[in-house]
Image (cartoon, grey):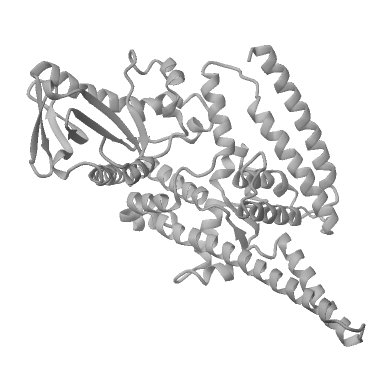
């Protein structure tokens, strides 16, 4: 597609978005926006659970965009009649479609446009960097030993935040399930009463009116009554406190007040708990919420002088252990060495270290755990910090692997010694077919690592040399389901 075609498509997409925005604004003038949001969230969740999530935006991103549009209007008087709510939802869906196309065909302005455009689109659509249990394990492994230090500094630790998150998610699910069961029960009762009525007796009509009214109340409750209250949520917690709830709300909650401090819609994913009132909130996807918790406490630890060094050591050790366990699913334990010391080709008589080394037949795998900071703007379409992010998380692993190759070329073999046990093994260059550098990142890099043709233009890698980069969670999946070491 040439630049003229792209510019024309981008203009048309933005024109349609403007029209959709005007239509939505008109619908919201006299609508109860909180009822619209609650109804829309329930509508998308119901469609998603039924396997009918066929909109242009996946449910998590769609509800996030709805919050961005509707929360600033909360508190305004408006109609919550079913027809008015449905009309607003239709306009909201139309806006969602137009917005997605405007994202896809945005104007490109500067160098690295292709990669930046891809990252912007990825950040706008994709939610969740791993499976929920993997994120839970990452939070526990990376932060658990420092829980008390976080509580001292912030009043809320990551493990307690995780407990509250699980309670919110669980209560949201319980409320939706209870409402659904009640709807089915009342529908069946109304149908049975209708079929059994042989006369229009006053008693029969009153009974049918009663059930019909309850059914209408159930349906109207879909506009927000299903959203958990704090009293409901705290029943799932041990020793809950109102102060913890407030702290959790301040850190991860989106409300009509906090949305004013958010400059970019993409940054709403840092606040994936929707507070429709101070004591009423829901979250719809565990992975998004767990990512927000991890990112917040990771950022805090890296910027806090009292935690920075402890955290860096903790994460590094935890990642090495996790990688060794993952490799142990495929390779014999005797062929895996953690904290593998070997001669430093740049320092005569000195040693350097690889995090995990695996020797399997004619292959030598050199795995480097990279827990370097990943600035949010780097993987949300901001190019300024993108190059150093790739360098720290991918290129550095390649540099470490080249040291192994240089020793093999110089000496014809390399001797590895496990730092913690002094266990050793020797690898001969003549018996090797390939040395495979692998960069294992703490976080998923939004598919940056698979964009070889684009990232090579950054000038970070020489020739065709490029390490395989994979996140710790993706490597976990690969090693669980690979049929063999080969």
The answer to whether 235 is drawn above or below residue 103 in the figure is below
Lateral position of residue 379 relative to residue 53, left or right: left
Nearest the camera: 378 or 208?
208
Q: Position of residue 323 (x, y in %)?
A: 27, 42
Q: Residue at x 36, y 34 (%)?
A: 470
Q: Position of residue 375 (x, y in %)?
A: 45, 34
Q: Position of residue 453 (x, y in %)?
A: 44, 18
Q: How many marks?
A: 0
Q: Residue at x 58, y 70 (%)?
A: 232
Lateral position of residue 330 relative to residue 459, left or right: left
Q: Residue at x 73, y 73 (%)?
A: 188
Nearest the camera: 300 or 129?
129
Q: Residue at x 84, y 47 (%)?
A: 29
Nearest the camera: 140 or 220?
220
Looking at the rendering, which quadrant does residue 395 occupy?
top left
Asked if residue 79 shows in the view, the reply is no
Asked if residue 406 shows in the view, the reply is yes
- Which quarter of the figure is the N terminus placed in? top right
- Which quarter of the figure is the C terminus placed in? top left
Q: Position of residue 40 (x, y in %)?
A: 71, 52
Lateral position of residue 106 relative to residue 310, left or right: right
């Amino acid at each position: 597609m040439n630049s003229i075609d792209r510019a024309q498509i981008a203009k048309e997409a933005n024109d349609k978005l403007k029209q959709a925005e005007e239509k939505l604004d008109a619908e919201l003038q006299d609508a109860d926006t909180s009822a619209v949001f609650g109804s829309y969230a329930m509508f998308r969740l119901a469609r998603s659970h039924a396997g009918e999530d066929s909109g242009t935006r996946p449910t998590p991103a769609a509800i996030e965009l709805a919050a961005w549009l509707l929360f600033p209007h909360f508190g305004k008087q408006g109609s919550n009649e079913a027809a008015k709510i449905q009309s607003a939802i239709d306009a909201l869906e139309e806006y969602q479609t137009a917005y997605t196309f405007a994202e896809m065909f945005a104007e490109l302005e500067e160098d690295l446009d292709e990669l930046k455009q891809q990252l912007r689109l990825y950040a706008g659509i994709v939610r969740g960097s791993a499976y929920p249990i993997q994120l839970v394990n990452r939070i526990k492994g990376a932060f658990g030993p420092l829980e008390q230090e976080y509580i001292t500094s912030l009043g809320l630790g990551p493990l307690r935040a995780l407990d509250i998150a699980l309670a919110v998610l669980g209560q949201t699910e319980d409320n939706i399930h209870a409402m659904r069961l009640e709807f089915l029960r009342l529908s069946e009762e109304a149908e049975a009463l209708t079929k059994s009525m042989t006369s229009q007796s006053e008693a029969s009509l009153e009974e049918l009116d009663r059930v019909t009214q309850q059914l209408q109340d159930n349906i109207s409750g879909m506009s927000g009554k299903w959203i958990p209250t704090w009293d409901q949520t705290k029943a799932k917690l041990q020793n809950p406190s109102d102060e913890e709830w407030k702290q959790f709300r301040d850190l991860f909650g989106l409300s009509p007040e906090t949305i004013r401090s958010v400059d970019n819609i993409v940054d709403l994913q840092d606040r994936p708990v929707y507070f429709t009132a101070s004591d009423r909130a829901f979250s719809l996807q565990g992975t998004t919420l767990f990512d927000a918790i991890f990112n917040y406490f990771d950022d805090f630890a890296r910027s806090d002088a009292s935690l920075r060094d402890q955290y860096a050591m903790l994460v590094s050790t935890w990642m090495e252990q996790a990688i060794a366990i993952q490799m142990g699913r495929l390779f014999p334990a005797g062929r895996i060495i953690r904290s593998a010391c070997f001669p430093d080709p740049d320092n005569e008589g000195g040693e350097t270290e690889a995090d995990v080394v695996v020797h399997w037949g004619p292959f030598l795998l050199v795995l480097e755990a990279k827990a370097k900071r990943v600035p949010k703007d780097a993987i949300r379409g901001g190019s300024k910090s993108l190059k150093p992010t790739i360098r720290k998380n991918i290129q550095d692993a390649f540099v470490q692997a080249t040291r192994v190759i240089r020793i093999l070329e110089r000496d014809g073999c390399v001797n590895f010694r496990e730092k913690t046990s002094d266990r050793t093994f020797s690898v001969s260059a003549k018996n090797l077919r390939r040395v495979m550098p692998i960069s294992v990142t703490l976080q998923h890099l939004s598919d940056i690592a698979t964009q070889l043709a684009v990232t090579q233009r950054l000038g970070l890698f020489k020739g065709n040399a490029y390490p395989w980069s994979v996140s710790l969670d993706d490597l976990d999946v690969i090693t669980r389901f690979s049929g063999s070491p080969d």
